[in-house]
Image: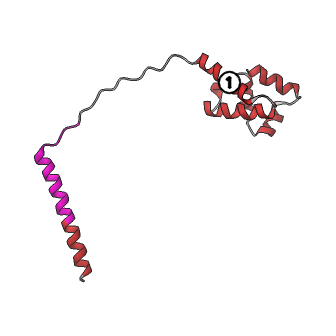
Amino acid sequence: MGKYLKQAREKKSYTLEDMTELTNIETKYLQALETEEYDLLPSPFYARVFLKTYAKYLNLNVNSVIQLYESAQNIKQSPAPIKPQTEAIELPKRSPSQKKKVSSLWLIVAIILILGMVYMLFQ
């Protein structure tokens, strides 16, 4: 696919620098597309964006270029990554008496806040 891009660019007598000015894509990224060194690009997302833009300026079928890229990526990808095994951590449970203490504490805080507001209103 990279050779296809390069041939299309050269057919139009454009240099990589010309394409950089037209597309606003850095020369090193255009060169990475032409040499199919996708690991030099910031991310697969940017690879697709750069390819769409590059194909558009070369008057190529954008969908075809993206399909070629994606099929090449599917071939290169390794099997599904192995997920790390994680152990479930069980948090300590509160006893009913602890739950009552916590709810009683919230009730006391709420009463104090209400009394404080009433006091401020009548001052």
**94 and 39: which is toward the camera:** 94
* Residue 37 locus on image (x, y percent): 67, 23
Work out whether residue 43 can be spotted.
Answer: no
Q: Main secondary structure of the magenta part?
A: helix
Give the image location of residue 18, x and y in percent: 84, 35
Q: Look at the image and give the residue range highlighted in magenta.
A: 91-110
Residue 9 horizontal side relative to residue 63, left or right: right
Identity of the residue furthest to the left in this view: 97
Provide residue 122's location: percent of width, then percent of height. Answer: 23, 82
Q: Is residue 71 left or right of residue 87?
A: right
x and y percent of residue 48 in the render?
66, 31
Please give the residue where the numbered disc 1 appears in the rendered image.
67
Q: Is residue 12 above or below residue 117?
A: above
Residue at 68% from the left image edge and 35% from the top image edge: 49
Amino acid type of the residue tagged 1 in the rendering: Gln
Residue 117 seen in the current view:
yes
State left or right for residue 95 relative to residue 54. Answer: left
Q: Quadrant of residue 36?
A: top right
Q: Quadrant of the N terminus?
A: top right
Q: Residue at x 75, y 40 (%)?
A: 24
